[in-house]
Amino acid sequence: MLAYVLLWMVLWAMVGGVMTPRIYARKDLDVANTGLAGALMGAALGPFGLALLWWRSPKLTGRWLATPGVLAVLLFAAAFARTYPGNLCVSNGSFVVTQVVNGLILGLIYGLMALGLTLIFSILGVVSFSHGEFYMIGGMLVYYMSVVWLPGLNPLVALVGAALITFLIGVVFERLFLRVMNTGQVERPGEYAILVTFGLAFFLQYLTLALVGATPKKAPRFLDYPRLDWPSPENPWLLRMRAGTVEFLDTVSIATPRVTAALIAMVMLLILMWFLYRTWIGKALRAVSEDRQAAAVTGINPDTMNTLAFGMGTMLAGLSGASLVQVFSWVPWVGTLASARAFVIIVLGGMGSLPGAFVGGLIVGLVEALGAGCIPDPQRAAAYIPAYGMVILTLVLLLKPTGLFGREL
Amino acid sequence: MKRRLVLWGGAALGILLLVVAPFTFLHQAYLVHIGIVALFYAILASSWSLLAGYAGQFSFGHMAFMAIGAYTTGLIGKFVRLASAPTGTCTEFPLGGWYLVLQNATGPNCLERGMAQMPPGSLIVQPPILVGILAGTLLGGIFGWLIGVLVLRLRRTYLALFTIGFSEILRVAINAEIDITDGPNGLELDPLFPNGLTLFGRYFEPTDKLPPYFVMLGLFVVSMWLMSWLASSRFGLFIRAIREDQEAAAALGVHVVRYKVLVFVVTSMIAAAAGAVQAHYIGVITPNILLILQMSLVISMAVIGGLESLVGAAIGAILLEFALEFLRRSFTIGTLTVDMTTWRLVFFGILLMLTLRFQRNGLIHPLLERITRAEALRETVAKRQAPAEV
Amino acid sequence: MAEIALDVNQISKNFGGLQALRDVTFQVRGPELIGLIGPNGAGKTTLTNILDGVIKPSSGTVYLNGRRIDPLPPYAIARAGLGRTFQVTRAFRRMTVMENLLVPAMAKHPTARRSDLERRAMEVLEFLTIDHLRYEYARALSGGQQKLLELGRLLMLDPDIIILDEPFAGVHPRLMEVIYRYITQVNAQGKAFIIISHDMETIFTLSRRLLVLNFGELIADGDPEVVRRDPAVIQAYLGSDSDEPWQPERRAPTA
């Protein structure tokens, strides 16, 4: 049954996605978002929705996108529940909630990393293909500092150290290789940026491999949570905290390293917001991203801002890795998948949009958690995790290349 | 035309060298093996340079097309049989007196069950390797067309992201669909010549390196010839014009959409063909050929050789592959042992970045251009120095 | 050769709610030399892009030599006989001058021998006085030379109607002469020109007919002498915040 519903939805979504822009163009209306609206409408309501859309051809406000979007998701969920009544995602509510919370927690950290990438893009106009490598290095540094070099060092101190080092690597790379893009010393700067950051990724990944080897590493959890039962030890229905897990409401059980990582990400987000919106340098950064030349006239040195933005971007990636090294095991190529995920998020959120990166991160985290938890064949579900994001990327690029919060291209 | 003479002479000399090489002191199996791999990378690097350097389409999905070629022929070898009588149990299509049989991936083997009911003396044979390779090439072209159409509107960075996405989805799917592709364990393929080969009175074992070498060399020569011809014809002129300025090219009568899609089709087919041949030579393919790092290797070879030169990219790939192989040896300085299997790639990464930064047109291409453009430049200079008449 | 005929009928274009062009109608008959002027934002570039096929009109039709061209894609319009330059020079920078010229030639004549096209390209380059640069990459050329290169490409496309977008902007006086000569000579060979320019002096000396756009409407069409005195035209220029002063005096080009 699910297969037929899916086929039906995809078919009408394709019809809607292809035909709606043409119909709007013929009626001489604004074609922005028409492909997306048509696809969503087709997926949600099939030919009836499309007929309504084409006949009325309304101005496509957010409501015309959100309503069919939600309907399509509901339709899919209903078909899924009918087909697999025994699936954990259908029969076990607490499992679903746990997956959702886990997804949101990871999404928060993914968002933090993507925020770095989008910051780089909005100031330098460059998508760094080496972003995942900084994520990987951040994690490696925390592991080495707190476990190998200085055993007993507080991991949170190591976290700060990793942030500083990834910041410095980013700054040095920007000065050596990206600065020349603005001075006219390299031709075709767009191509150059893609290739040189790609080269950096290659270099960093193999350098790490040569230095630390291929054995997986895992840092112990940063914090052991105190034993806590609330409201009372006899009946801790609200909160049951142990060193390794936290359980809310008797249903949602989360590993504490993830909670720690989420807390770090939240603190970092707050600091970042404060920095960007309250300090002079942050305002200067945003000014440069709005209008480079105008900013230069007001006495901001755009070159310095470039270096700073790249360093901050790599630092955010490093921090994300640093906070997740206690959650996942760490090998020199973890960055590849992280890079890909960050691309998905910034394309989904809209290139250069800070709130977009945040929201996009949460969405990707959710989709991955639910996909991994709900797809019937568990082995296959796990194997497909990297693909969920890529499917989102493909759909966004085809239907709405500007993303959720993007500026027009 | 002195210039043409230089070009043809150079090409002939290069091919002659490659043909004779395995018969000289370089005849050891190990070296011939590196030669095959080098030619494989040369085909990939030069076709990528046609796509990215000439047409400006920075696709990171080139290895995906290579993998499509490899897996197509591998899956045909695994699942497709030709039978002289209907099996009655498998999915099958009549084909001029024979039957094209598709085996099922899961459940009891339909072919074995079918064989019991087939009339005695019925034949069941594998389709020839060549058919698999051709089918792989064709499917590569079809996917190239599809991707080419999908990315028409995407600009540089988005195109790079989209093609990475395509490549990753393919890799993950191959990893996950273990029933069909054998997943990360790898799909096994027959050698290029499953029954050996007798040529000029000499018998070659199926594992012998010389026949695959010449197959790969043949593919290399054919694809280089095809691409050079395309690059020097209006096709090459148009895709470069599109790379430079799509709108201006259209305003001058160039059918932008057709040529953009066409360049995807051509380069994907070449990559797929190389992948199919290489897969049969190696004998096993894993989804790891789709790792981004494999793609970076091809990109590095093309960039270091010269992104805007087919020959430069090919020479770059051959030289770098040999360099990489010979740098495998680890060495010791004092107490420090340097494991070169990894470090050579670190140096490779540095070389790539430095080339990009300081020698943008690659290391080989400028040398070639000095030879081919010498005449033209002399003329320009002479004209400029002549007293200007107005 | 059949008589050149461009028929622009009631072209309108809306961008969302903004009306960029309203019912623009004019004809070109034979090798005319037409100037197209108007204050900034009057719709000159939009009109060019519609004629060229880059954007489609909301309503109205365009016929070239009896064939309807407005639904065609740009490359087909170019082959049908309408060529244009862009306001900003758009040479193919990483191709040689010769290759730049061969692109339109090969697009228009798919079956012609390359050597014939190259010979033709040499003639064009000599005419434009940049033949010594034929193997030079276009990026090595000066801005003015690149402008000449664009004109050369148009000649290789061999269109019936040539639209030049600001051909004189930022050009060295000596090159201006070459461009001026190009326009008059090519025009004398039977090609029609539509020239968009802010350079009033040159437009007045050069063109024999003037089209004036204002707020998307064609407010005047006729002999430059007459158009110059048209109150609507004067109003359009004086009433807008345009950068360039209205200079009705007629002067010879710097020769």
Image (cartoon, coloured by chain):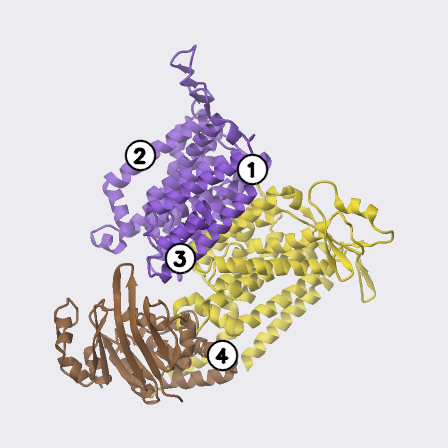
Which mark is in front, 4 or 2? 2
Colour of chain A as rendered: purple
Quadrant containing the C terminus of chain A is bottom left
Label 3–label 1 contact, CB within 8 A: no
Going from N to C along the chain, the mark reached first, 3 or 1, is 3
**Which numbered tag is attached to residue A21?**
3
Q: Secondary structure at mark 4?
A: helix
The residue under label 4 is which amino acid type? Glu
The residue under label 2 is which amino acid type? Leu
Label 3 neighbour load within 10 Å: few <14, some 14-19, many 20+: many
Q: CA distance from mark 4 to mark 2?
A: 64 Å
The residue under label 1 is which amino acid type? Ala
Quadrant containing the N terminus of chain A is top right
Q: Secondary structure at mark 1?
A: helix
Label 2 neighbour load within 10 Å: few <14, some 14-19, many 20+: few
Label 2–label 3 contact, CB within 8 A: no
Colour of chain C as rendered: brown
Q: Are both tags, 2 and 3, on one chain?
A: yes
- In the foreground, A329 or A355: A355
Which mark is in front, 3 or 1? 3
- The spot of residue C19 in percent (x, y) is 25, 64
- In the foreground, A292 or B351: A292
Q: Is residue B364 visible?
A: no
Q: Are both tags, 1 and 4, on one chain?
A: no
**Which numbered tag is attached to residue B375?**
4
Figure check: B245 above or below A14:
below
Give the labeled residue for mark 1: A381
Going from N to C along the chain, the mark reached first, 2 or 3, is 3
The residue under label 3 is which amino acid type? Pro
